[in-house]
Image (cartoon, rainbow, N blue to C red):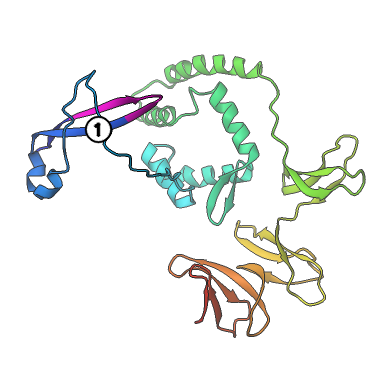
Amino acid sequence: MKEARLKKMTIEIEMGRYILKASGSDILFDGFLTIYEQENLSKINFLYLKKGDKVYLLRIKPEQFFTKPPPRYTEASLVKKLEKEGIGRPSTYVPIIDTIQRRKYTEKIKKKFFPTGLGKTVNSFLIDYFSDIVNTNFTAKMENQLDEIESKGKDWVDVLKIFYHTFSEDLKKANSAQKLTIEPVYSEEICGECGKKMLIKSGRFGKFLACSGFPDCKNTKPFLDKIGVFCPEEKCSGEIIRRKTKKGRIFYGCSSYPKCSFVSWKEPTNKKCPECNNVLLKVNDKKNGTYLKCFNSSCNYKEDLDEKKKNRV
């Protein structure tokens, strides 16, 4: 069926120091809207007002709305976005995802990508000095030009000349920029040598702690991602820390490893099972919601956190 044609109007109403907005529309041609129910069409109304008309306040209906931010990218949703924007090829998707993690621009938490301090700094720098290149339109256009070069429909020298003219100017501006600094992230750890706070740093092999008094103090320590839970093993004074496998999967272990071998795929809590006194694990399940379950696989105790009640599985 043919498209419907609507006449739309948006008006702004001055109310003291406030600006109120209202919008409406009128159907000029029904088109496919003919098959809609009449009660749905009745909701479409036009604002028959002109500039300068006075309106009168009838009532105030207090309502509050919050705009939800878009969800964080997962590997799957990031690939879909790349495909939609025409960026890369199936053969380059894996290297792209690998690069942003290997260079510590992002970190994966519960299968979702989160930008690191380094990633935010690099991103801001590229946008400030290479905005001609760091945008989806340029990347998609370049992909098309490479296809045309491959099919011998375009001279690669001409493409390179056009690109490099802009790029060389951007490069000159970037070379004159001040040295980039990453906002320091302080930890709760105190340096055992000079008493100053330790900073959380990122290195080739992941995060580590370094004294904020550098270069006067060069003390470093391994970074332990503590979750505020004590190790449930008897006679162990360690704390539970969040760790990652080589493939990036999160698991939980004791900070006293290898002396203590406690490990769990689910997040431990400081709560104890009322039936067998084992530690309770926090489980996030799309189907069953968030609940606690016993670390002991032979115990069926479950505590529903969503409804704040306990029940048996």
Q: Is residue 232 left or right of residue 287?
A: right
Q: Residue at x 33, y 43 (%)?
A: 61
Determine the residue positioned at 82% across, 39% down.
212
* Residue 286 shows in the view: yes
Q: Is residue 245 above or below residue 13?
A: below
Q: Position of residue 297 (x, y in %)?
A: 60, 81
Which residue is rendered at x = 44% and y = 51% of the image? 76
Which corner quadrant holds the N terminus?
Answer: top left
Can you give x and y, in whole percent of width and height, for residue 194 in the image? 92, 43
Residue toward you, 142 or 308: 308
Name the secondary structure under disc 1. Answer: strand
Residue tagged 1? 23
Q: Position of residue 153 (x, y in %)?
A: 33, 24
The tally of labels here is: 1
Q: Along the line of sight, which residue is nearer the eye, 189 or 77?
A: 189
In the image, residue 5 lies at what x, y percent? 12, 33
- Say left or right for 313 vs 137: right
- Magenta stretch, main secondary structure class: strand
Left or right? Give the position of 313 relative to 41: right
Q: Amino acid at mark 1?
A: Ser
Q: Quadrant of residue 154?
A: top left
> For mark 1, does the 10 Å Cα neighbourhood hold few (<14), some (14 to 19), or many (20 or more) residues?
few
Residue 1 visible:
no
Q: Is residue 214 magenta?
A: no
- Which residue is found at the position 65% from the left and 37% from the top? 118
Up-down relation of residue 123 to residue 230 (above or below):
above
Q: Is residue 310 above or below residue 213?
A: below
Q: Which residues are magenta?
A: 8-20
